[in-house]
Amino acid sequence: MMRPYRVKIAQESLDDLAARLAATRFTRPLPGHGLGVPAGRVRHLVDYWRDGYDWRAWERRINVHPQFMTEIDGLDVHFLHIRSARPDALPLILTHGWPMSVVEFLPLIDRLSDAFHLVIPSVPGFGFSGVPREPGWNRRRVAAAWAELMRRLGYERYGAHGNDVGSLISIELGRLDPHRVVGVHVTQIFSLPSADPAERALLGPDDRAKLAALERFMAGRSSYLALQSTQPQTLAHALADSPAGQLAWNLQLFGDAVSDDYILTNATIYWLTDTAGSSALIGYHGNRPPAGPSSIPLGLACFADDFFPSIRPLAERDHSAIVHWNTYDKGGHHAAQEEPQLLADDLRTFFTLRR
């Protein structure tokens, strides 16, 4: 049921990518600020993608780690599986976000594999996992696939960690498999204010500032979410035809906080696997709020420059067992890349009490 897997992209696919990059038709810069990803930034990265970036080096870096493929719920699921030499290691499943891939967590492997058995899957519709052929692959269905994956691996007790949409999936996993999940650790708790003015009135100055930052993000930088959650097929036509377009779309949530190589590795994976459209489905299919608060032990590592700040009074409304809440004065939305040691240490602290 578990098939060994290695990333091995055909050279003709890389040659086709290079030809398309060479023929990129760059758009003209628009006047003003705050209009989206700057044209100069895309041009710089496309030039590096063509002449400096080395996909094969990143392919080797991924392939250093054992990888497998298994069919769950009619879909192939790709995952890295790094077993610790420690007899009492706790299994830990790490779930990436959008527009990321399993590459998000490569910096954590050496920092955590002494104490944890690490399972790092590609979310269905992303990267090297299969593409859904039917509606319904929302975060709850992905969480159910993760529970089955951990069962197949023989793990009776395990922890979960996620970033971005991986945070949402990890919390769902805790809801679905509470007898085996010892705790869930995330880098965002996506609790939004209700329509009740009294709820906002109870927020202190720091939380009101976080809410204002969150509302600025939703007003000025969330167009990707609106389009992906309404017309993902329309978007996919453009991104499947232009690697520069795929890159620019991904850049909305990368900015300048992570390396050019990391940005291009993720863009290359989305391009080579044609998963621009299918990765959008995670925000499209039926992600309704749960009926009541979660009760699994929940921990948060909140990094200073995350554009989606977590607001504790709202989080406590939605989650009844928040047992760990650490804030850091640096780092951002891509903590595993920006501050991997801080994140690894926070994971150790949280799960030490959950073993």
Image (cartoon, grey):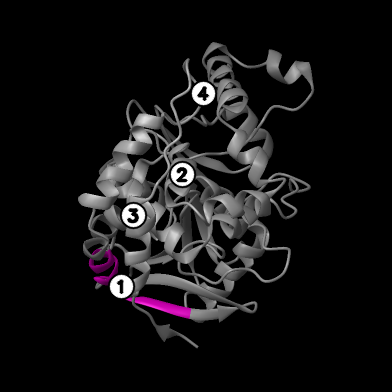
Q: Which residue is mark 1?
A: 11
Q: Which residue is mark 3?
A: 265
Q: Earlier in the sequence, mark 1 or mark 4?
A: 1
Indicate yes or no whether the magenta region holds residue 277. no
Q: Earlier in the sequence, mark 2 or mark 4?
A: 4
Q: Which mark is residue 250?
A: 2
Which is closer to the viewer, label 4 or label 3? 4
Kind of residue at badge 4: Leu
Circles 4 and 3, Cβ within 8 Å, touching? The answer is no
Measure the C-alpha gap from mark 4 to mark 3: 25 Å
Q: Which mark is residue 35?
A: 4
Kind of residue at badge 1: Gln
The crowd level at tag 2 (other Cα within 10 Å; few <14, some 14-19, many 20+) is many
Q: Quadrant of residue 148?
A: bottom right
Q: Earlier in the sequence, mark 2 or mark 3?
A: 2
Q: Nearer the viewer, residue 177 or 234?
A: 234
Residue sitting at x 66%, y 64%? 141
